[in-house]
């Protein structure tokens, strides 16, 4: 479903940040679930560390996937005025530490709320 929505979004003339960030989050979530179920890397960690690391991976993965999607859309359309400028992409990448920290904190908070 995520792949279909990405291909539909690539064909549209839309350059908002919410759509690309939500698709980036969906791609990051699918990647984290794939790592969790295919390689079972998270099972060797304690619950609190596992939730924090998954949250950090989702936060950073969202930004990285969204930046890749922005680049893909700009490269695919090749307009004189790009859908997403280089400044927008670099600005999003500059927020990578913030999104990673937010993901870690949300993962830790989810673990704390789960343990009650």
Image (tube, rainbow, N blue to C red):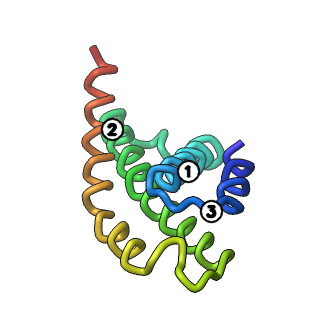
Residue under numbered circle 2 = 107
86 relative to 21, above or below: below
| Disc 2 secondary structure class | helix
Label 1–label 3 contact, CB within 8 A:
no
Residue under numbered circle 1 = 23
In the image, 8: left or right of 62? right
How many labels were placed on the picture? 3
90 relative to 98, above or below: below
Q: Nearer the viewer, residue 115 or 13?
A: 13
Label 2–label 3 contact, CB within 8 A:
no
In the image, 111: left or right of 69? left
The quarter of the rendered structure image containing the C terminus is top left
Count neighbours of disc 3 (C-alpha within 10 A) and say few if under 14, some if 14 to 19, many if 20 or more. Answer: few
Q: Nearer the viewer, residue 48 or 81?
A: 81
- CA–CA distance in space, label 2 to label 1: 20 Å
Residue 4 location, x and y as percent?
A: 74, 49
Q: Residue at x 42, y 73 (%)?
A: 89
Q: Which mark is residue 70?
A: none
- CA–CA distance in space, label 2 to label 3: 35 Å
Residue under numbered circle 3 = 13
| Disc 3 secondary structure class | loop
Q: Residue at x 33, y 38 (%)?
A: 107
């Amino acid at each position: 479903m995520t792949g279909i929505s990405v291909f539909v979004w690539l064909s549209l003339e839309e350059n908002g940040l919410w759509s690309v960030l939500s698709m980036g989050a969906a791609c990051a979530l699918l990647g984290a679930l794939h790592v969790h179920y295919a390689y079972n890397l998270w099972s060797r960690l304690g619950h609190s560390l596992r939730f924090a690391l998954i949250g950090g991976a989702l936060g950073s993965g969202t930004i990285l996937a969204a930046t890749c999607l922005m680049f893909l859309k700009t490269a695919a359309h090749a307009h004189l005025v790009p859908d997403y400028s280089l400044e927008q992409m670099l600005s999003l990448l500059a927020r990578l530490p913030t999104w990673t920290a937010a993901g870690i904190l949300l993962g830790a908070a989810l673990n704390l709320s789960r343990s009650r």
